Image (cartoon, rainbow, N blue to C red):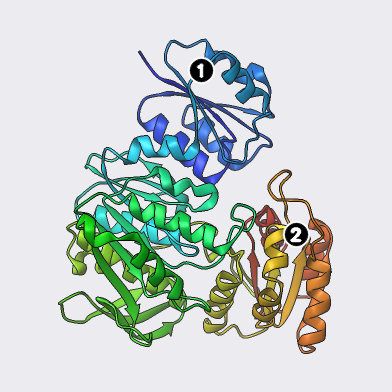
Amino acid sequence: MQLHVHLIGVGGAGMSALARLYLASGAVVTGSDASGSPVLDDLRALGAVIAVGHDAAHVAPCLASGRRLVVASSAVPASNPELAAARAVGAPWMKHAEALATFVNDRKGIAVAGTHGKTTTTAMVTVALRAGGLDPSFQVGGELVDLDTSASIGSGDAMVVEADEFDRRFVALAPEIAVITNVEPEHFECYASDAEMEDAFVAFLDRVKPGGAVVASRGAGPARGEQLDRLLQRAGLSARDVEVVRYASASDAHPGDWTLRDYRPDGEGSTFAVTPAGGVPITCRLAVPGAHNAMNMLGAAAAASRAGVPPEVSITALATFRGVRRRYQVIAEGPVRVVEDYAHHPTEVRATLTAARASRPRGRLWAVFQPHLRVRTERLFDDFVAVLASADRVVLADVYSPAGREPDGVYRGSRELVVALRAAHPGVHADHARSDEAVVNAVVNHVAPGDLVVVMGAGPIDRVGREIARRL
């Protein structure tokens, strides 16, 4: 009997990718989301029946099926009428993480975790394994530009997935290989303390299958890897015969088994050398910009090597990797270049603006930023001020805070960020724009030929970026 799956909140990156996996597996897929989007249109084109808005009627066909399953996004409250209807009749239901685990845990799973870089690294591992002939299944939290999808079922026995620490989602996974790009304080709406988040990462590491491997960076950000070192020590991996492979830049204080050295920006990309564990240096070229992406490539090649792909094969394939949508994606070329990026944490904003500056724009560097969550903005307020100051012009949209996502409280927002920016960095021209139209006008009315506009944020700021690109 054919499985009928209904996904509540199907428009999100993780849920839409899960819908693609179910469709590829032959299931009947229905779903709903609070608002329409191109993502929903794409799923409809693949055969899913998607409704806009939430109503118990939307889940009724699934509940009438003989073989049924309801999957809810972590953002869906228990009061959601579709979830309530499913629970009222005792229909099986699970959250996104549990559903994803049903695809991963019986395969040779490669799960990529970390505060930053996991989406791009997951995509890179996927590309490397495909180049090595392994044809993995995969689920990425964004669409690969080269493959025009975020998920697929392959013919091989490996599966590459993004392992999200939000809401402890990654603890449902049991991979053979875990990759950790870095660990910094994050998701303050989920974790009451840094120690609580560390506990979640340890729980994820404890899920790595005996005889597997953990591929971990030497860390990034202010802590320089100290938090990640502590997590690896706590996990007791050697007792389960889990190998630990470290990767690092040659400039790091501690060496790695895999090492990157001689990094040089090269137009929109970079060149550098990679020395695999026990191997000889390999000269590399990467088409996507930024030292952070070179490190992502290093981690991906190390993980692919552990899965059986020779380093030379991975590195050759990744040289032409074109990235993931909304990760330093150029959306307008011309007298003014417009780039959009998913950066929403100070470390990510810094990396994105550093990559933009390294591309040597002829004019000014613009940071058009929508802070994501009031609690994150408050907790990392001073860090945001510091990293945004690296731009010449800053335009801040109001903080994006989905209803019910974070605790109530009194928080500083975009207006206060602009005040602090102007006070601490008088040379930076900063504005607060309270609507999408105001953000667009603040840019298009003042840009000049040679300027580079970087639109950043994890919320709906992407529609503002597209409108800026259209008008320019």
Q: Is residue 105 above or below residue 184?
A: above
Instruction: Identify the residue shown where x is 47% and y is 54%.
Output: 200
State which quarter of the image contains the N terminus.
Answer: top left
Residue 173, image x, y percentages:
37, 45
Residue 290, image x, y percentages:
47, 76
Residue that mark 2 sits on: 399
Instruction: Identify the residue shown where x is 53% and y is 62%.
Output: 195
State which quarter of the image contains the C terminus.
Answer: bottom right
**Other-residue count near label 2 (Cα within 10 Å), few / some / many at <14 / 14–19 / ≥20:** many
Residue 182 falls in image quadrant: bottom left
| Distance between mark 1 and mark 2 Cα atoms | 37 Å
Tell me if residue 153 can be seen.
yes
**Which of 44 and 110 lies nearest the eye of the viewer?**
110
Q: Secondary structure at mark 1?
A: loop
Q: Is residue 70 above or below residue 128?
A: above
Q: Is residue 296 left or right of residue 34?
A: left
Q: Amino acid at mark 1?
A: Ala
Residue that mark 1 sits on: 91
Residue 204, image x, y percentages:
39, 52
Instruction: Identify the residue shown where x is 69% and y is 37%.
Output: 35
Q: Is residue 131 left or right of residue 80?
A: left
Q: Is residue 387 above or below residue 303?
A: below
**Which of 115 and 317 lies nearest the eye of the viewer?**
115
**Other-residue count near label 1 (Cα within 10 Å), few / some / many at <14 / 14–19 / ≥20:** some
* Mark closer to the chain start, 1 or 2: 1
Instruction: Identify the residue shown where x is 41% and y is 31%.
Output: 22
Q: Amino acid at mark 2?
A: Val
Q: Is residue 291 left or right of residue 285?
A: right
Tell me if residue 369 can be seen.
no
